[in-house]
Amino acid sequence: MGIKNYIRGAACALLVLLAFCAAGCAQGGASGEYTSAGLEALDEGSYSEALELFEEAIADGEQQMLAYRGLGLAYMALGEYESAAEAFTEALANTDGRMPSNTEDIRLYLATAQYQLENYEDVISTCTSLLDDSENGNADAYFLRGASYLAEGYTDEAAADFDAAVALAPEDYDLYLNIYESYSNANLSAIGVTYLQTAQSLKGDDTEYYYNQGRIYYYLGNYEESQKMLITPVEAKYEPAMYLIGKVYLAMDDYTHALAIYQQIQEEFGESAQCYNGLAMCAIQMGDYDTALSYISFGLSLEGTDGKQELYFNEIVAYEKKLDFVTAAEKAEAYVANYPTDEAGQKEWAFLQTRE
């Protein structure tokens, strides 16, 4: 069965907001000692520590809106979306009319957690409340509501929201790519491709432009053009481009160059689950399954959940390739319990049940 090479999912579109949560949490007044420390821990990627600090902030009576908001962010980063949704709901309960930007911000996080939980009706409700109160609209809210409409089968409503999002953020490559993935997940890739074509027409000449164009070509399956576009940002050691060219090499079955680029990423930027997953995929394709499992173990030992689903999946594949079907089946059973909507995982589990 095949290995899993993760790009990014439409369901995770708004999780990029975590990148600037530390700045955003400063809104609305003084944070308090524990809240400030929690924000620093979030910024450093110490999510379990952040969780404890925000709980201390709540117990100590620090500004509850900020403390619960931070708690929600910590739960989000740890992949505990139900707890995150509960925390954001408490944060909303502690806002008032003097905090419109905070209310909008928290609603976005709440909608993201709800989307991760596949509570699409709740997402639609949360985003509708946000948009009803927003003076200028919000591209992220339109995207999330559109993706939820699409998941529920309301294609006309989804298209209207996606177009509204693009009108507000016409140069946002992430938006175009996530709209495409939403349509792809709904088996409507032909509609999604039109958004990628629009993104292809955007102009630019800097590092990010070439990286983004490389992403578009990657999604379209044109790996040679993607590789050409990525030359400039990779030479500049732009981290996202280096990860992407690793995926391009894997897609082109060039495992030697893929392995070298992932090793370079580790040297330049340190450990990450995504990088260990890339190294593991190279090792699997090169027939070195024990080394692959070693990489997977290192990746799974890191804090947080980002990239770990793919590591768990490829752990199944590595054991399967070793012909250790008993262990592979045990791993697959745990995988489908944790990721029940993943079709590839369900197929692996079904296949392995025939080998026991």
Image (cartoon, grey):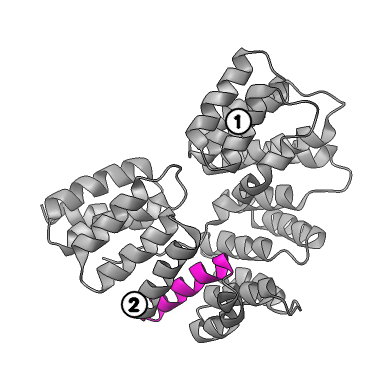
Please say whether residue 90 is visible from this viewpoint: no
At which x and y percent is residue 245? 49, 74
Say which residue label 2 marks: 255
Tell me the SS state at disc 2.
helix
Q: Residues within 10 Å of mark 2 (few under 14, many from 20)?
A: many
What residue appears at the point 52 percent right and 25 percent down from the top-left corner?
52
Say which residue label 1 marks: 38
- Judge from the rendering whether residue 178 lies leftward or rightward of residue 198; answer left or right: left
The residue lying toward the viewer, choosing from 224 and 277, is 277
At which x and y percent is residue 280? 31, 63
Number of dots carrying numbers: 2
The CA distance from mark 2 to mark 1 is: 41 Å
Give, as a three-letter code, the residue at label 1: Gly
State the image quarter where residue 234 is shown.
bottom right
State the image quarter where residue 62 is shown.
top right
State the image quarter where residue 166 is shown.
bottom right
The residue lying toward the viewer, choosing from 275 and 349, is 275
Which mark, by number, is residue 69? none
The residue lying toward the viewer, choosing from 39 and 349, is 39
Tell me the SS state at disc 1.
helix
At which x and y percent is residue 42? 58, 38
